[in-house]
């Protein structure tokens, strides 16, 4: 079949990345987009594009009928699904086949088999691939699962059979906690994957999560592209990925590579895929699952092998044999990737949405950035909160980490809180630099707290005050006395006193005194000197603490967003409502834009502190709304399936006398 036009059934950074290779190969790239994405970067990069529905993913990017109609209308010959959404949906692959559209991925049967943790595990056991002890049977009753759990022993993992990405996954450390874990895992699995089926596995608490990238064509040839280490995970979500693994054991790589090929051959796999393993302290490895698509972390493999995996996917799908042989694959250098998310690490990693007022991506030697955003667009609550993948590549692991850390320091986004500073702190931790970590490392509260401990408060307040004040105003104030600006940072009120020492038309030097404001009382927080050297629309050059540096900034209503190489944050001009602590006001508001998927209380109910009153779904994650104190429900201002905005009032309750 002659292929000229390929439709990308996805959005964001993976759509942009796939579009680039499609165009590099000389094909026409077609984008689809929802109403929320009509101004998105992937739409601008594509040669052609077509709208497929409203913002909600089940009416757009998950709507098989609309995507097929779009492909036929625009006369596409093939469809690349990217990752997520319909990439591992066997019905979608089957529908493409029926409509004579080339699906750039494996066969529907392979997707169906490997999409089920229970079926795939049974197949791997039959094929002789090592698997973690557990239960993956058809009997899904609580009684049977509890019985099997007692045989496996604790701790154990409850996993969604049809899931991935940490959704529907619970670690259970004791028998009495299992019933609640089963209930919550089923709910999240059904919501996320349309299936409530669960499996149980023995928990390997200090293992390495290592995956093998494979390529297989329709002529029976299958090779692997080495390993990726994805052990740095938070809530079972990958944070940092690298290739090769810090273990860097050639013999282990070869054994796992052969096992991955055996896994692929057992289901007549065709295309690009990833076989995931868990490796224990004794370097014994166990099959976890096989992802029948391109992975988020594929760039690190591309950099160390110099193989364009998307290109290989397309070539295999259109019937070409693999030109690569196993002896052609040699890992050169080291690559490490960080996932930049729109989330607030200090606030329990709550997903963020809002406008991208300023965006400066890093560039230079040893740096690759895969992103789907640009300045001026918005991060919406409808999709995954990943903003970009930033990758460092060097001759050694040390150099790759240095490139990546420096790249993150030169990444600036204003308008939305991100995990950038958390990633920098993580990369500078000794256990990361030395490669001494496993899947349990980021489960430690002490380690997490160290990584997100607030820093640079004095600098943020000083810079915000200076940015807010024009140089001409300072020149005037040098004759009339100090100027006072009231700012809030993390719900704390501060008074900033600016006393110009020497001001001119181009340089302003001043003394700054910052006072805490406690219930109308004032206490000196710190004193310093600072110099404003220059200031343009979004960048100011300032000396603080004797260090002269550039600060990028942007204004959004009463907020002043600031980012430099050391920190990124937001300071607000003082307004009284900023100081209201909602958790003690009895007024529970939405922590982000999202959708109400469950309300578990009623007016008049007596509730206890920590009780879940409702659940909000945002950016593919469920967030419980919990009672902040013992009390009685006095109002419910939402309904199930309602879309809510950040800070919208949800529930009110009166505190118990």
Image (tube, rainbow, N blue to C red):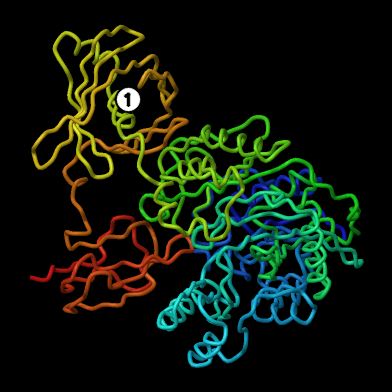
Q: Closest to the observer: 400 or 597?
A: 400
| For residue 300, above or below residue 279 | above
* Residue 584 location (% of width, % of height): 18, 59
Q: Quadrant of residue 184?
A: bottom left
Tell which of 170 and 436 is nearer to you.
436
Q: Position of residue 413 (x, y in %)?
A: 46, 38
The picture places residue 347, in percent across and down from the top left corner, at 35, 53
Please give the name of the residue rendered at 69% of the width and 78% of the height, measured from the top-left corner.
121
Q: Which of these two is toward me, 641 or 462?
A: 462
Asked where in the image residue 211 lies, by quadrant, the reply is: bottom right
Residue drawn at x 33%, y 55% is 646
Q: Is residue 222 left or right of residue 451?
A: right
Helix, strand or loop at label 1? It is helix
Which residue is tagged 1?
Answer: 467
Q: Is residue 317 above or below residue 298?
A: below
- Residue 489: quarter of image: top left
In the picture, which quadrant includes the C terminus? bottom left
Q: Is residue 626 left or right of residue 4?
A: left
Q: Between residues 608 and 130, which one lies in front from this camera angle?
A: 130
Residue in view at x 77 percent, y 61 percent? 272
Pointer 1 local density, CA inside 10 Å: few below 14, some 14–19, many at least 20: many
Inspect this view and state whether residue 30 appears.
no
* Drawn side of residue 352 relative to residue 115, left or right: left
Name the spot of residue 242 as percent of width and height, x first. 66, 49
């Amino acid at each position: 079949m002659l292929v000229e036009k390929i439709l990308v059934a996805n959005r964001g950074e993976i759509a942009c990345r796939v579009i680039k290779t499609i165009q590099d190969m000389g094909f026409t790239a077609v984008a689809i987009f929802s109403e929320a994405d009509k101004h998105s970067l992937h739409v601008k990069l594509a040669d052609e594009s077509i709208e497929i529905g409203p913002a909600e993913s089940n009416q757009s990017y998950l709507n098989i009928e609309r995507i097929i109609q779009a492909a036929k209308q625009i006369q596409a010959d093939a469809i690349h699904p990217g990752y997520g959404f319909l990439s591992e949906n066997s019905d979608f692959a089957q529908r493409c086949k029926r409509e004579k559209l080339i699906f750039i991925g494996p066969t529907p049967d392979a997707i169906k088999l490997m999409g089920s943790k229970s079926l795939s595990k049974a197949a791997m056991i039959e094929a002789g691939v090592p698997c973690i002890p557990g239960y993956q049977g058809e009997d899904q009753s609580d009684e049977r699962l509890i019985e099997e759990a007692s045989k496996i022993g604790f701790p154990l993992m409850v996993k969604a059979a049809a899931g991935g990405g940490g959704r529907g996954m619970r670690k259970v450390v004791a028998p009495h906690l299992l019933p609640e874990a089963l209930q919550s895992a089923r709910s999240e699995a059904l919501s996320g994957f349309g299936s409530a089926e669960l499996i149980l596995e023995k928990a390997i608490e200090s293992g390495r999560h290592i995956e093998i990238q494979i390529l297989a064509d329709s002529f029976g040839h299958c090779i692997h592209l080495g390993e990726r280490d994805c052990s740095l995970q938070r809530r079972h979500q990958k944070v940092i990925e690298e290739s090769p693994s810090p273990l860097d054991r050639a013999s282990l790589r070869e054994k796992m590579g052969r096992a991955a090929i055996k896994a692929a051959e057992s289901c007549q796999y065709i295309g690009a895929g990833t076989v995931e393993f868990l490796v224990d302290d004794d370097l014994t490895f166990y099959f976890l699952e096989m992802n029948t698509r391109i992975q988020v972390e594929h760039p690190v493999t591309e950099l160390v092998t110099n193989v364009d995996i998307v290109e290989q996917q397309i070539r295999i799908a259109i019937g070409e044999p693999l030109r690569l042989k196993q002896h052609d694959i040699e890992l050169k250098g080291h690559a490490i990737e960080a996932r930049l998310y729109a989330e607030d690490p200090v606030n329990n990693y709550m997903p963020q949405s809002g406008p991208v007022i300023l965006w400066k991506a890093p560039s230079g030697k040893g740096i690759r950035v895969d992103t789907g955003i640009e300045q001026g667009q918005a991060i919406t609550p409808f999709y995954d909160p990943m903003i970009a993948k930033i990758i460092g590549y060097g001759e050694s692991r040390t150099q790759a980490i240095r490139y990546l850390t420096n790249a993150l320091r030169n990444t600036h986004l204003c308008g939305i809180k991100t995990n950038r500073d958390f990633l920098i702190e993580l990369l500078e931790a000794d256990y990361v630099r030395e490669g001494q970590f496993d899947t349990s490392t980021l489960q430690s509260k002490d380690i997490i707290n160290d990584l997100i401990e607030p820093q640079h408060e004095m600098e943020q307040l000083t810079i915000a005050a200076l940015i807010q004040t024009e140089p001409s105003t300072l020149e005037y104030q040098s004759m009339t006395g100090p100027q006072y600006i009231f700012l809030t940072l993390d719900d704390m009120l501060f008074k900033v006193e600016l006393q110009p020492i020497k001001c001119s038309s181009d340089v302003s030097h001043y003394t700054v005194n910052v006072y805490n404001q406690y219930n109308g009382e004032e206490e000196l927080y710190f004193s310093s000197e600072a110099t404003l050297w220059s200031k343009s629309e979004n960048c100011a050059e300032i000396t603080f603490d004797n260090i002269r540096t550039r600060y990028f900034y942007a204004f959004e209503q009463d907020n002043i967003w600031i980012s430099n190489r050391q920190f990124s944050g937001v300071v607000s001009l003082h307004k009284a409502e900023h100081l209201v602590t909602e958790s003690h006001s009895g007024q529970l508001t939405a922590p982000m834009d999202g959708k109400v998927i469950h309300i578990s209380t009623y007016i008049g109910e007596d509730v206890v502190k920590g009780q879940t009153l409702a659940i909000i779904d945002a950016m593919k994650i469920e967030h419980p709304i919990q009672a902040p104190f013992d009390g009685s429900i006095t109002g419910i201002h939402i309904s199930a399936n309602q879309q809510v905005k950040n800070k919208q009032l949800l529930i009110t309750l009166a505190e118990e006398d």
